């Protein structure tokens, strides 16, 4: 079961002016399951995205980048689950194009104004007849108040849907932010088998939105790992419809920028953490903070070295305060970050929760195993490393490694 | 159970002139278990080693490097299991020094002629009284024909001991090679929770042996992964006693060099593969060959990207011919090797055994799932990637990821 993942039924998901969402049970892989979503976006919205760096990136990812580059104004997104349309060669690209064309025809826009997303099994061709038959059903369903259904309709191995909503007051104006994400396995930057969409009615100029979408990704979705695998289809999109009552923002100096930037970052971090909380087989949620690094890269590398170590993750599963495995993971981080080759292990400090567990190259003199055990027994575990060699820091979020991770991934295609 | 790991009881382990081995049941972590080994090395032998790159390297590793650098001629090694003496600060270094001093006194050599090795739990101090009491027992036991017992006495989570022996004829002279290794978890270059020792009666000059020990490591112990974790204590040693009847070798041009080099490489690869066969929870043994790369680094990076992917490894456990996960792992290898950023996924070919499963960016037209299934059903699985972009290649060996991996590592300290 997910680790402290809030049930979205209890959440108010505020509609965003300029956004309507429509789902369908298209039957792409399984019957009677919401497996398709269309998002309609009002003209004049800014839309930015960040995509997987996997060289085997899927056809829809390639087409998304092309359509964004065409700068005709994105008016719709179409998302299917059950099939990733990745590793599908020329046919896969044709299928993605056909999907955009058909949806464009129904919605009376141009194909370049449609962004396609697919998630699911790799290397299978999309069942095009089934998929295309679902499109009019999804469009018929379009409704501004459909975020709950939308979050359900993008799930794959997710146990539960993930969504976020916040209304803030920015200099007397109301700004609404609502978003959703999916993903549970093949999760590691850059990026993961994940999709995430955040919409706001704030008015953010396109090139500025492009900039901050990258920055926000680096402190949210690029800070999570379930299993160290980077998928072929990851996409994170921010849509700013500009239909709220807050004034236009075209530069970082504009009034309201800082508040909205912080709120979008919080939304992205929340949705990224939701993915980890629903990590395949997860029973623990770990926050790994690395402080006092020379560079952010150093901090992030050590964070992931701890956060993706199978030995650390199995120890967490067992609630075992195994400091040794954490120290070993810190020690081999230099494999992936050259500046760490002069890391002085004698001057760093390791904390489990608030408990100092290691310093001066070994176990802290004050450390009692029962104190470490009390931290490990919790569902939410904080690990902090103070490197004491600089001013930079990074935080990564990860989950433990359980029997169920193996079961889920051994049985995935059966 | 280990995957096709030959039982050493059925192997002849030829004694090496100039080497005697003595074990003890010192009781370091558990009673009634061979947990200490002393290796006596004749004067005049060449001894070379390669050690972990983990920044948290253990006290004995630091001391080994110091004693090798002292160039007084290594005359003994002492190995204990049950405790890694890593993350133990100044006390740990004193303990390692005391161990060398006491053994040196008993054997009437100097402490700098002793190399210490420890493997086991990290962050605990060595139980020195127990350990020192074991030393005279191990020395009393010294015998040239003790390789079987020696292989047992260096085991930790290993299910079975690992050893190798070969006698070859080099230009009419007999050369003997015998070695052993241990390790099952925390296995990933550079290097692993592993110890390996190979001895030969060949006569190889010290600086040449240093060179080839590094080279041999790169194609053997640095080509295996069980879980992607690099331990604090890994060491691989080659001892050339020169007491056989083959002439001295001081350069690569000398008669017999090529044959002996090849034989030592074979020994190291065999012992490295033994560690994977006994990988924690392993049910499958995978050989991943990457051909047609621009550089060896490219090939090795892709090999490990496949070989350490939890998704690939859980699919192997399930005998699932999941090409998609292998292609995804190839695709994200560019995360760790910049030259792969221009990898053309359309021009590579992927084989399971002899079966072409993917080409031109997708599933091969000729591929039938039952052919891939037949390959996956075997205990020994070969995966080959032809990148078709250069002349370099690399092979890595790895195992699958099973429920038992999680069980073993969740229960390790209990």
Image (spheres, coloured by chain):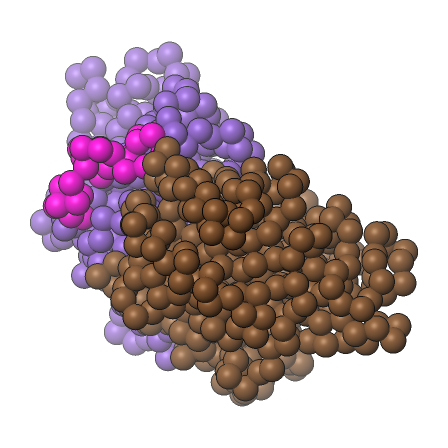
Chain colours: A purple, B brown
Residue at horizontal 70 percent and vertical 60 percent from the top: B241
Looking at the rendered structure, the number of numbered marks drawn on it comes to: 0
Inspect this view and state whether residue A36 appears. no
The percent position of residue A71, horizontal first and vertical second, equals 53, 36
User: In the image, what residue occupies the spot 83% across and 57% down?
Assistant: B249
The verdict on residue B198 being magenta is: no
Q: Is residue A357 visible?
A: yes
Whether residue A363 is situated above or below residue B186 in the rendered picture: above
Task: State yes or no: residue A371 in magenta.
Answer: yes
Snapshot quadrant of residue A405: bottom left
Residue ID at (23%, 48%): A321
Image coordinates of residue B253 in percent, x first then y, are 90, 56
Of A164 and B63, nearer the camera is B63
Q: Using residue B155 as the reference point, say whether residue A202 is left or right of it.
A: left
**Magenta part of the protein: which range?**
A348-376
Which of the image's four quarters has the C terminus of chain B? bottom left
**In the image, residue A347 above or below residue A270:** above
Query: From the viewer's perspective, is A114 left or right of A57?
Result: left
Q: Is residue A386 above or below residue A195?
A: above
In depth, the one of B180 and B353 nearer the eye is B180
Res A407 quadrant in image: bottom left
What residue is drawn where x is 53% and y is 33%?
Answer: A341
Residue A219 position, x and y percent, is 37, 34
Viewer-side residue, B164 vs B241? B241
- Give x and y (percent) for residue A269: 29, 38
**Residue B407 occupies quadrant:** bottom left
Image quadrant occupied by the N terminus of chain B: bottom left
Q: Is residue A35 above or below residue B8?
A: above
């Amino acid at each position: 079961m997910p680790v402290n993942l809030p049930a979205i039924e209890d959440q108010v998901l505020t509609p965003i002016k300029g956004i309507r969402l429509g789902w369908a049970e298209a039957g792409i892989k399984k019957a009677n399951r919401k497996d398709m979503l269309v998002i309609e976006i009002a003209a004049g919205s800014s839309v930015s995205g960040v995509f997987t760096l996997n060289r085997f990136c899927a056809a829809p990812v390639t087409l998304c980048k092309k359509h964004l580059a065409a700068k005709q104004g994105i008016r719709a997104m179409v998302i299917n689950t059950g099939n990733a349309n990745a590793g599908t060669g020329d046919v896969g690209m044709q299928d993605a194009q056909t999907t955009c064309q058909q949806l464009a025809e129904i919605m009376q826009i141009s194909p370049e104004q449609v962004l396609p997303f697919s998630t699911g099994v790799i290397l299978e061709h999309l069942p095009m007849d089934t998929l295309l038959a679902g499109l009019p059903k999804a469009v018929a369903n379009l409704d501004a108040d459909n975020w709950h259904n939308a979050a359900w309709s993008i799930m794959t191995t997710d146990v539960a849907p993930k969504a976020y909503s916040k209304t803030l007051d920015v200099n007397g104006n109301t700004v609404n932010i609502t978003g959703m994400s999916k993903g549970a396995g093949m999760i590691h930057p850059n990026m993961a088998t994940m999709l995430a969409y955040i919409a706001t009615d704030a008015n953010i100029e396109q090139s500025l939105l492009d900039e901050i979408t990258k920055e926000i990704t680096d402190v949210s979705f690029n800070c999570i790992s379930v299993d160290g695998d980077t998928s072929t289809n990851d996409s994170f999109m921010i849509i700013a419809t500009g239909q709220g009552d807050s004034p236009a923002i075209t530069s970082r100096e504009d009034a309201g920028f800082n508040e909205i930037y912080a709120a979008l970052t919080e939304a992205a971090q929340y949705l990224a953490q939701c993915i980890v909380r629903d990590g395949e087989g997860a029973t623990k949620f770990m926050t790994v903070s690395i402080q006092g690094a020379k560079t952010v890269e150093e901090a992030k590398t050590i964070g992931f070295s701890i956060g993706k170590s199978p030995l650390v993750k199995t120890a967490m599963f067992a609630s075992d305060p195994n400091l040794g495995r954490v120290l070993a993971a810190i020690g081999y981080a230099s494999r992936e970050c050259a500046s760490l080759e002069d890391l002085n292990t004698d001057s760093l400090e390791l904390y489990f929760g608030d408990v100092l567990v290691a310093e001066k190259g070994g176990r802290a003199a004050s450390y009692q195993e029962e104190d470490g055990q009390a931290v490990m027994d919790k569902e939410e575990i904080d690990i902090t490393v103070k490197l004491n060699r600089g001013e930079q820091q990074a935080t990564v979020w990860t989950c433990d490694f359980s029997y169920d991770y193996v079961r889920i991934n051994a049985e995935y295609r059966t």
